[in-house]
């Protein structure tokens, strides 16, 4: 019955238009009333404790690093370098989009920010070259959602806090699946775009490639610093976020000189707004998470799907389908915060590696950024590229299907995630 109260309160509040953070608090109040333990101090204490976590400091710093990277010219130079390398290949601009998406993912970890940067620069170029515009927009959106899978990832930070798992291990385990997603998107693009009568860019000489590489060397150095520092235990993810922020600030101000003191307040305000929204969601969700544990909802849900616990792959497939359905209605952060405390105990009971589950969970939540009607990344690409949302939805379908197929291949063959993950951590 507690599961019913939880779902009715949460879904009912969101159905009448209550913002997700407030819906989570309302859900917590409903559970407290049902359990006969209503106390406003519980809400206040859990929200304060939820915000007072050193690990969560990584979120504002990575967000700020991403904003500084875009404003300081780091993103554009990465794209220019990718164009110099593969722009002359048939379908080359699509390959550029995914290459740049993977590199940007290893710097910012924000799907929306990466998609906006790629759409602003590459969509006009792809349109002029003769590529199908909706399909190009769909490819950029699908490439953008790689960002929360490849470290540094704010999604992994939030999942790590909600699950009490090692964020460093989650970071390292996300590298191989993120690269696999990018590879599959390139293959899908080359298949679906083969009939486009698009022009290829002139082949860059080795000298031009070298100059593009030198211009991008400072930008390409950031992921090396972040991932290398975490891998070798020099810094924690939070400390890596601080280093990334000051690195992006230094490069933007003094190396590329595209970032000015006058533009800094706008950058800080944009990062602050995003941080405030995410942190309020985290704090509100931790109230519900505490009450989910008190109400023993995981055990109640476990009794419903008890037969699947003895079959880990079937359980993972069931969970993946569930998250895909939830992802059509919820954004990435609320999905993580609501479902993690419910699903993780069941996964652990079934003997599934929790790091593997975390990677699969985040991959699935990222796919939810492409599924209408919410589809946050679809809306970002639509707005930046000035393309009707309906056309972007049509263009993204081949790539959405490809990413879902990758997800279920990894369900069937978890070693694809686990073996490289153990190499990295």
Image (cartoon, helix red, strand yellow):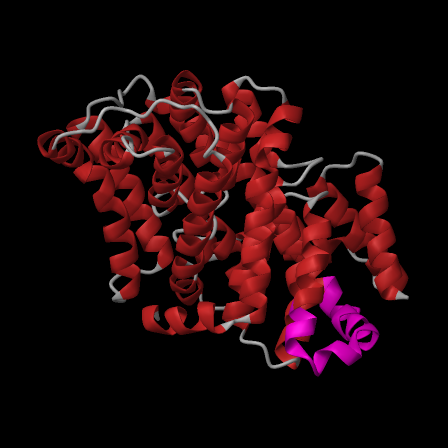
On the question of residue 164 being in view, the answer is no
Q: What residue lies at 65% left-to-right and 56% top-to-bottom?
A: 286
| Quadrant of residue 84 within the rendered picture | top left
Q: Position of residue 424 (x, y in %)?
A: 33, 68
In the depicted structure, whether residue 45 falls above or below residue 213:
below
Magenta stretch, main secondary structure, is helix
Q: Quadrant of residue 130?
A: top left
> In the image, residue 55 lies at what x, y percent?
44, 57
Judging depth in this view, the residue of 16 and 318 nearest the camera is 318
Q: Residue furthest left?
A: 207
Q: Nearer the viewer, residue 60 or 110?
A: 110
Residue 60 x %, y %:
44, 42
For residue 270, side relative to residue 296 (left or right): left
Residue 181, percent across and down? 46, 52
Task: Work out whether residue 40 or residue 87 is closer to the camera in this orientation and state it.
Answer: 87
- 232 lies left or right of 420: left
- Per the rendered image, the range of residues in magenta is 291-316
Work out whether residue 382 can be spotted.
yes
């Amino acid at each position: 019955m507690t599961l019913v109260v939880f779902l009715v309160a949460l879904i009912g509040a969101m159905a009448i238009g209550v913002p997700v953070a407030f819906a989570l608090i309302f859900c917590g109040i409903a559970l407290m009333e049902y359990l006969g333990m209503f106390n406003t101090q519980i809400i206040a204490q859990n929200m304060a404790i939820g915000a007072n976590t050193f690990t969560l400091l990584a979120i504002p710093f990575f967000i700020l690093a991403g904003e500084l990277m875009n404003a300081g010219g780091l993103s554009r130079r990465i794209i220019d370098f990718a164009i110099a390398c593969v722009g002359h290949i048939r379908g080359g601009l699509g390959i550029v989009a995914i290459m740049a998406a993977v590199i940007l993912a290893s710097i910012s970890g924000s799907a929306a920010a990466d998609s906006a940067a790629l759409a602003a620069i590459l969509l006009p170029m792809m349109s002029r070259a003769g590529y199908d515009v909706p399909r190009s927009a769909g490819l950029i959106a699908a490439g953008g959602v790689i960002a929360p899978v490849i470290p540094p990832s704010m999604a992994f930070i939030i999942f790590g806090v909600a699950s009490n798992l090692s964020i460093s291990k989650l970071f390292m385990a996300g590298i191989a699946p993120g690269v696999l997603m990018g590879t599959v998107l390139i293959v899908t693009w080359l298949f679906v775009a083969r009939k486009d009568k698009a022009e290829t860019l002139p082949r860059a000489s080795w000298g031009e490639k070298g100059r593009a590489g030198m211009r991008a060397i400072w930008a390409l150095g950031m992921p090396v610093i972040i991932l290398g520092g975490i891998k070798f235990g020099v810094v924690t993810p939070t400390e890596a976020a601080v280093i990334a922020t000051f690195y992006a600030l230094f490069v933007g101000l003094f190396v590329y000189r595209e970032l000015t003191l006058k533009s800094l307040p706008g950058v800080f305000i944009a990062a602050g707004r995003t941080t405030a929204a995410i942190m309020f969601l985290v704090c509100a969700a931790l109230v519900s998470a505490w009450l989910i544990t008190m109400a023993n909802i995981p055990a109640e849900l476990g009794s419903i799907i008890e037969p699947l616990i003895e079959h880990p792959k079937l359980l993972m497939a069931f969970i993946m389908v569930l998250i895909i359905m939830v992802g059509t209605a919820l954004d990435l952060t609320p999905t993580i915060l609501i479902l993690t405390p419910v699903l993780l105990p069941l996964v652990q009971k079934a003997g599934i590696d929790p790091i593997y589950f975390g990677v699969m969970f985040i991959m699935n939540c990222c796919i939810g950024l492409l599924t209408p009607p919410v589809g946050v990344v679809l809306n970002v690409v639509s707005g930046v590229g000035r393309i009707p949302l309906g056309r972007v939805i049509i263009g993204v379908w081949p790539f959405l299907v490809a990413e879902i197929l990758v997800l279920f291949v990894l369900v069937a063959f978890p070693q694809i995630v686990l073996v490289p993950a153990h190499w990295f951590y």
